[in-house]
Image (tube, grey):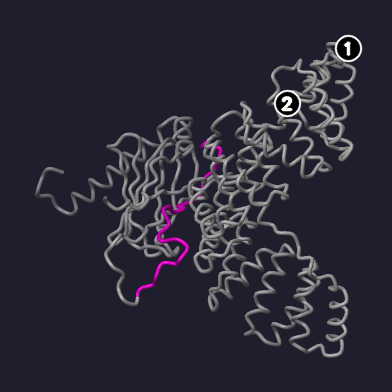
Amino acid sequence: MGHHVASQQARSVHTMSCALALFVLLTSLPSHLRSQEKERSASLRGTVRDSEGKGVAGGAVHLQAQDPTRTQTVHADSQGNYSFAALDAGMYGLRAEMAGYGDTEVPSLFLGPQEVKNLDLILLPAKTGAAQPGTAQTPEFFDEPQFAVAGVTDTTNLGGHGSDTIVRTREALAKETVFLSKTPASTALVAASEKEKLLRERVERAPRDFEANHLLGKVLDENGKARDAIPYLERAGELKASDYENSYELALAYAHAGNYEQARDRAKALAMRHGTAELHHLLGDVQEKLRNPLDAVREYQLAANLDPREPYLFDWGSELLLHHAPEPSLQVFTKGNRLFPNSARMLIGVGAAFFFQGSYDQAVQRICEASDLEPNNPIPYLFLGRIQSAEAPPSEKIAEKLRRFHAKQPENAEANYYFAMSLWKSRAASQDSLNAGQIESLLDHAIRLDPKFAAAYFQLGILHSEQQDFRKAISDYRQAIQFDPQMQEAHYRLAQAYRKVGDAAKAEAELARCDQIAKESAQEMERERHEIRQFVYILRDPPQAPAR
């Protein structure tokens, strides 16, 4: 290589000789070494996008291994796509840059052996001075998002923080927060069956009547008959293909019927002509059902930016929380709380995001505020009850709210149960007979109200065990297991109670069942972690406060 004069022919011969030598060397390696090399090969690919989700061509993407001298750089193609191949397993840092944009960085990224990971990178416009005339204005909701969702990854690479109880409670609160967005069906359609009957008669008389077909399809879908609604909405679409409302209702009916691919395709086609917030929100719902969380969160964000109404903001925040992005979720819920201070579920969202981050006092404070907003709404109390079960030290704030829950709804089984658990946490000692008697009375009442309340039976069993009444405890634990056969701790405590009464064989059987459930539970947790993919997000520094 150091010779500055060499003929083209000589260079060609040299190149062929090197290639042949390399081929001989590789094929002479032992097969097990070649297979080990293959097993270590991982790859990373994705798309560099702008804030609207469009590919950014030419962006430089740098991948740095733990050794800072080992940095690879590629440039995104005309569609914004980039890729790195033949990578060793391990931790990497990833950074994208492009003129006119701020840099985006993912400081910690794990690649497993032979893993193929997809990760999109979002480049936000570089901060400039005053906006130029004719440029799009930032929506009112967010002056500028202080985060960007860059991609998704498997949660098993990240692990949980805190005790197993805390991790499980965190996951449960995230799922239950999402559930809060599923509003119950309207009770306004009292005469729906009569309306449906009249519309059916109208369609029979005039099968080509657009309005009759459209209205009948809409009524059927609103009343939970999405599959019946689709033919009428399709016929209406044939009669008037340009009608936006009918096209939207048809996409909605497909989604309600579980035909998510058709719902997505129709909504996307419609969004090309009508970029409404409701369409993007529908696409968010559908993409989540299709297990495309990255697309879902972007659609929810578009919907909220176009129309920052409470349901759209809440669904955006809950989608972020479900996929383990508590900081961005907290930003959305906090802004939503400012815009809708009378929304109890927005406050619950703020609390759930704080709990996910490990800020338990903040979580309790926000959910207590939600219970003060709607004192007769059981949902904030149920969230507080779950948090109380996960926290070791008793919380006076939670105890106060759960006491109020019971006072307001004494015939609610969960109100009795959670108030009993609050007293249990705060009792001075297990020998506190007055407290124990009140706890037992509350648990008994919870069971009378809900005879299948497994957790209440289980807690009664613990109470009776502490009182050395093992016959009663055995009966309680068996009832708990009858209504919740997978309750691992009930099997374990039942085994201990059997030992106390001298029944070693039954004790061993319960311990064996306990071990089996533990293994099944671990497998189920692993499966759930694979199902719920985690967002990889980038946090921006918040705007600097003006100098004083």
Label 2 with label 1: CB-CB less than 8 Å: no
**In screen coordinates, is 179 left or right of 490?**
left
**Quadrant of the image containing the N terminus:** top left
Observer-nearest residue: 260 or 365? 365
**Residue at the image point whose x is 75% and y is 27% from the top:** 488
**In screen coordinates, is 179 left or right of 41?**
right
Q: Nearer the viewer, mark 2 or mark 1?
A: 2
What numbered label is drawn on residue 226? none
Q: Secondary structure at mark 1?
A: loop
Determine which quarter of the picture holds residue 192: bottom right
Determine which quarter of the picture holds residue 497: top right
Q: Secondary structure at mark 2?
A: helix
Label 2 sits on what residue type? Trp
Observer-nearest residue: 537 or 14? 537
Whether residue 354 appears in magenta in the rendering, the answer is no
The location of residue 507, given as percent across then percent down, is 83, 16
Q: Where does label 2 land, which residue?
A: 424
Q: Which residue reaches farthest top?
A: 502
Q: Which residues are magenta?
A: 135-158
Q: Where does label 1 land, which residue?
A: 503
Q: Earlier in the sequence, mark 2 or mark 1?
A: 2
How packed is label 2: few (under 14 Cα within 10 Å), some, or many (20 or more)?
Answer: many
Whether residue 148 appears in magenta in the rendering, the answer is yes
The location of residue 506, given as percent across then percent down, is 87, 17
Determine which quarter of the picture holds residue 20: top left
The location of residue 328, given as percent across then percent down, is 48, 50
Label 1 sits on what residue type? Asp
Q: Give the answer, above or below, for where 178 lies relative to 42.
A: below
How packed is label 1: few (under 14 Cα within 10 Å), some, or many (20 or more)?
Answer: few
**Residue at the image point whose x is 56% and y is 37% from the top:** 156
